[in-house]
């Protein structure tokens, strides 16, 4: 699933593909925000991204199960 994260004072949003569900990401954000710590996300290729939870302006969620296009659907 593709998510876009808007960060305060940063002109471009961060776009990553993650394997987790929306509920998992919301829980991770809530936990990090309540502790005033960093939110850590792992993308589909295994890279980890850390963002200070207090600077996150918004999180936009894509479709959890993207529709496949092409001959092998």
Image: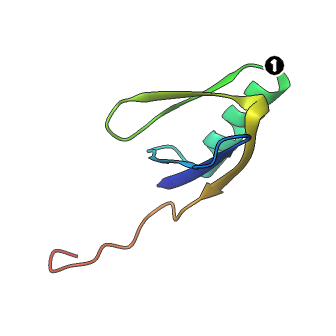
Q: Residues within 10 Å of mark 1 (few under 14, many from 20)?
A: few
Give the x, y percent position of residue 36: 81, 21
| Front residue (pair 21, 62) | 62
Disc 1: which residue: 35
Q: From the viewer's perspective, is residue 16 above or below residue 62?
A: above
Image quadrant where one finds the C terminus: bottom left
43 versus 59 height, above or below: above
Please tell me in which quadrant of the rendered image residue 10 appears: top right
Q: Secondary structure at mark 1?
A: loop
Residue at 73% across, 30% down: 53
Residue 12 is situated, as x and y percent measured from the top left of the image, at: 57, 49
The image quarter in which residue 65 lies = bottom left
Q: Is 64 placed left or right of 55 in the picture?
A: left
Which residue appears farthest toward the left when viewing the image?
A: 71
Q: Position of residue 56 (x, y in %)?
A: 73, 39
Query: Is 5 on the left-hand or right-hand side of 20?
Result: right
Q: Quadrant of residue 62?
A: bottom right
Q: Is 6 above or below relative to 71?
A: above
Q: How many tags in the picture? A: 1
Q: Which residue is at the front of the view, 35 or 57?
A: 57
Q: Going by the picture, which residue comes out furthest to the bottom?
A: 71
Is 63 situated above or below 55?
below
Q: How is the image coloured?
A: rainbow
**Near-viewer residue (51 or 42):** 51
Q: Residue at x 71, y 35 (%)?
A: 29
- Decide if residue 54 is on the left or right side of residue 11: right
């Amino acid at each position: 699933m593709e998510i876009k994260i808007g960060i305060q004072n940063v002109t471009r949003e961060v776009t990553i593909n993650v394997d987790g569900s929306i509920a998992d990401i919301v829980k991770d954000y809530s936990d990090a925000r309540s502790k005033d710590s960093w939110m850590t996300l792992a993308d589909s290729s295994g890279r980890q991204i850390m963002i200070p939870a207090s600077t996150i302006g918004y999180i936009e969620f894509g479709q959890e199960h993207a529709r496949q296009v092409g001959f092998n659907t």
